[in-house]
Image (cartoon, rainbow, N blue to C red):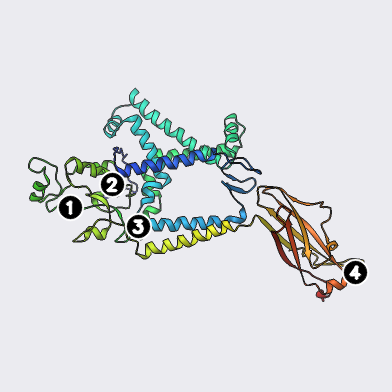
């Protein structure tokens, strides 16, 4: 019985050695790279004057459960801000994809940024693509060990500093630097730094395009967000292939007029578009999920077109509808589509809501809850006592002293016990019990109480909380 052919479950990875290229898309990627790394690596070290925490501009202080972002301080009670931000990020991803495809992947994704940086390191140390291919084929001699070893050592060093910087966002960075290298930092910080170092090096330096192709879910579902008018990196097959296909510029096929007369397109089959692609695809085969829309193949093709004096734009950002049109026009963004308008409207609404919430956030939070066991107590002199748990959160950057009163009852009716004053430190909270004792006649006519809490620093800004008052006849 003949053996059936078995298709391997896993495809062996073929290493990709990209060629460097110059052009506007490469320049834009470099600009994003510099900006992103400048912000990420320097932000934890930016000083910022604070009264209740370390002088750091951005710090996510898990100990006091506060997030400091310049002058904005957020608390666990503001978790819905994060939910809104995540919604905005998701809607923005849909919005951008509907307009220009996987531009996020090509320019702004964390995997793209670190992979780009590590590829640039290889270019710098190991040389251009032919030199790196030669280095791969030669035996392990001193040259290969030094060049490959030093490039990966630099990648590991950058990966370590990436993990260190990430942890620095959660503590005071200068002190963490001193504690980490003196061995006095918390054990979890060492674990986190080295874990992030390993994953950064593995994803950006080893796996690289495998993350984009096999692990990133966006690569799989992004096609559902593409429309016929979505701009994406495309090869103009009609112009590039002609009627007789692409052909190298040999004798008699060098000028564009000669090629058109012979039925050949403008593509000279140089392969530069494939050599510069970080995921190793051939854009001439059409739109593929592996394409991250980075535009490097556009730069490569434009450079080749310039060298042979052909018009640019054989590979370009264009829509499927325009490429198939009998009378194509200059590629442009098309906004008037539900897949673009819908997310845009949602983004504007949510951004406006978030701005309003931040502008109108309360700096003092007060909760007053009645102690339910027992609901009330009748004292020996006939007065009725209710107890309330008061919780005050001071979300300012200064210490506050509060006064507390109950509207409509005598001032002496409220008893705070042995609490001399209600003082709450910056960024802290305070819980205490308040007793309200009312004479029997007054208690009979009292159904609700209103607690009025006032900060001494701003007497005009009062917080009022209405609570229920229980009395004896309600138990029957």
**Residue at mark 4:** 382
Disc 4 crowd rating (10 Å Cα; few below 14, some 14-19, many 20+) is few
Among numbered discs 1 and 4, the one appearing first in the sequence: 1
Disc 3 crowd rating (10 Å Cα; few below 14, some 14-19, many 20+) is many
Among numbered discs 4 and 2, the one appearing first in the sequence: 2
C-alpha distance separating marks 4 and 3: 75 Å
**Residue at mark 3:** 99
**Residue at mark 1:** 239
**Residue at mark 2:** 281
Residue 451 placed where, x, y %?
Answer: 75, 63
Q: Is residue 212 something one can see in this rendering?
A: yes
Q: Is residue 172 above or below residue 389?
A: above
* Residue at 18% in and 44% down: 269
**Mark 1 element type:** helix
Residue 319 placed where, x, y %?
Answer: 28, 57
Confirm or deny contact between disc 1 and disc 3 (CB under 8 A): no
Quarter-wise, where is residue 120 in the image? top left
Q: Nearer the viewer, residue 342 or 105?
A: 342
């Amino acid at each position: 019985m003949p053996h059936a052919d078995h298709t391997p479950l896993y495809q062996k990875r073929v290493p990709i050695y990209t060629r460097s290229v110059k052009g506007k898309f490469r320049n834009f990627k470099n600009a994003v790279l510099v900006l992103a790394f400048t912000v990420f690596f320097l932000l934890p070290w930016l000083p910022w004057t604070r009264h209740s925490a370390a002088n750091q501009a951005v710090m996510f202080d898990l100990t006091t459960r506060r997030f400091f972002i310049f002058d904005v301080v957020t608390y666990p009670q503001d978790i819905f801000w994060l939910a809104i931000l995540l919604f905005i990020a998701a809607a923005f991803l849909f919005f951008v994809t509907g307009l220009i495809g996987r531009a996020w992947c090509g320019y702004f994704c964390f995997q793209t940024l670190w992979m780009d940086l590590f590829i640039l390191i290889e270019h710098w140390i190991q040389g251009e693509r032919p030199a790196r291919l030669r280095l791969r084929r030669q035996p392990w001699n001193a040259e290969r060990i030094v060049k490959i070893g030093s490039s990966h050592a630099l990648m590991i060093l950058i990966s370590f500093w990436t993990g260190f910087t990430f942890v620095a966002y959660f503590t005071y960075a200068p002190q963490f630097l001193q504690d980490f290298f003196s061995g006095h930092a918390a054990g979890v910080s060492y674990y986190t730094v080295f874990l992030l170092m390993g994953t950064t090096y593995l994803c950006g330096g080893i796996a690289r395009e495998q993350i984009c192709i096999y692990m990133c879910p966006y690569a799989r579902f992004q096609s559902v967000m593409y429309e016929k008018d979505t701009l994406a990196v495309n090869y103009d097959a009609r112009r590039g292939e002609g009627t007789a296909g692409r052909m190298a510029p040999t004798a008699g096929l060098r000028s564009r007029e000669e090629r058109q007369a012979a039925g050949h397109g403008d593509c000279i089959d140089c392969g530069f578009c494939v050599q510069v692609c970080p995921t190793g695809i051939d854009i001439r085969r059409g739109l593929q999920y592996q394409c991250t829309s980075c535009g490097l193949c556009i730069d490569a093709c434009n450079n080749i077109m310039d060298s042979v004096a052909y018009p640019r734009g054989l590979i370009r950002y264009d829509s499927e509808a325009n490429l198939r049109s009998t009378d194509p026009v200059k590629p442009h963004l098309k906004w008037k589509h539900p897949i673009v308008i819908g997310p845009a409207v949602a983004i504007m609404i949510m951004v406006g809501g978030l701005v309003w919430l931040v502008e109108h956030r309360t700096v003092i939070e007060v909760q007053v809850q009645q102690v339910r066991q027992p609901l009330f107590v009748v004292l020996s002199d006939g007065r009725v006592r209710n107890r309330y748990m008061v919780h005050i959160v001071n979300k300012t950057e200064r210490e506050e002293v509060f006064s507390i009163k109950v509207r409509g009852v005598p001032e002496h009716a409220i008893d705070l016990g042995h609490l001399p004053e209600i003082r709450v430190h910056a960024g802290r909270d305070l819980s205490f019990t308040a007793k309200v004792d009312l004479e029997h006649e007054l208690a009979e006519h009292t159904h609700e109480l209103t607690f009025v809490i006032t900060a001494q620093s701003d007497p005009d800004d009062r917080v009022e909380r209405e609570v229920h008052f229980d009395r004896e006849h309600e138990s029957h």
